[in-house]
Image (cartoon, rainbow, N blue to C red):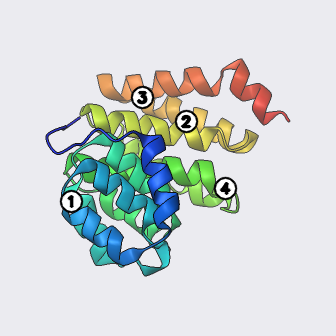
Amino acid sequence: MVVEKRLGVSMPELRKMAKELGKDHKIALNLWKTGIADAQLLAGMIDEPEKITENQMEDWVKDINSWDVCDQLCANLFEKTPLAWKKIHDWSKREEEFVKRSAYALIACLAWHDKEADDRKFIKLLPVIEFGATDERNFVKKAVNWALRNIGKRNRKLNKVAINTARKIGRINSKTARWVASDAIRELNSGAVKKRLSK
């Protein structure tokens, strides 16, 4: 994690500040411009998803240089915008490490939070996951794995589809792909996941 511009404010404190400030697009834009990770985390919490433009998403994603800002921004803001599904496809093809991670973090967040999304939307993303499974960079491969696991934890049907995708990924001649596959299969076949999906 890049820590140069970081004040060390805890997540509970940031959440408390976000609650006190309320939603405010202008303040969020100014906080982001500081380049300080803590301020950027807060910006993602207080910005207004309906006011986010594609240009803003592009500007912000290019500034990300740590996994926590990436993941929190996707969970608190980007996944709530109408552009979220489009940006997955755009960013998964990009080379920048945290731009690419953002694509897979978005899949993971949407798979966990978007209860209304049809299974087919996630099935269509499985080739995107296969595409990212050979990226050796730590922050990318972990997000690819996270995305696959979260799809497989939505319901029994997607669990089966995600495990089959993991097996396919495991046959790719790549150490990274084999790790993504074996780690996902282990969790998706676990008793805890099976028990939760049987309810």
- Residue at 44% x, 34% y: name it: 145
Q: Amino acid at mark 2?
A: Arg
Residue 195 as seen in the image, left or right of residue 166? right
Q: CA distance from mark 4 to mark 3?
A: 22 Å
Residue 161 in the image: x percent, y percent?
63, 41
Look at the numbered disc 3 and give the secondary structure of its residue.
helix
Label disc, if present, on residue 16 of the rendered structure: none
* Earlier sequence position, callout 4 versus callout 2: 4
Q: CA distance from mark 1 to mark 3?
A: 25 Å
Q: Amino acid at mark 4?
A: Asp
Q: Are marks 4 and 3 in contact (CB under 8 Å)?
A: no
Q: Are marks 4 and 2 in contact (CB under 8 Å)?
A: no
Q: CA distance from mark 2 to mark 1?
A: 26 Å
- Local packing at callout 2 (Cα closer than 10 Å; few below 14, some 14-19, many 20+) is many
Label disc, if present, on residue 149 of the rendered structure: 2
Q: CA distance from mark 4 to mark 1?
A: 30 Å
User: Disc 3 marks which residue?
Assistant: 180
Q: Amino acid at mark 3?
A: Val
Nearer the camera: disc 4 or disc 1: 1
Outermost residue, front side:
20
- Residue at 34% x, 49% y: name it: 70
The C terminus - image quarter: top right
Q: CA distance from mark 4 to mark 2?
A: 14 Å
Label disc, if present, on residue 62 of the rendered structure: 1
Look at the numbered disc 4 and give the secondary structure of its residue.
helix
- Residue at 59% x, 44% y: name it: 151
* Earlier sequence position, callout 4 versus callout 1: 1
Nearer the camera: disc 2 or disc 1: 1
User: Disc 4 marks which residue?
Assistant: 119
* Earlier sequence position, callout 2 versus callout 1: 1
* Earlier sequence position, callout 4 versus callout 3: 4
Residue 58 in view of the camera: yes
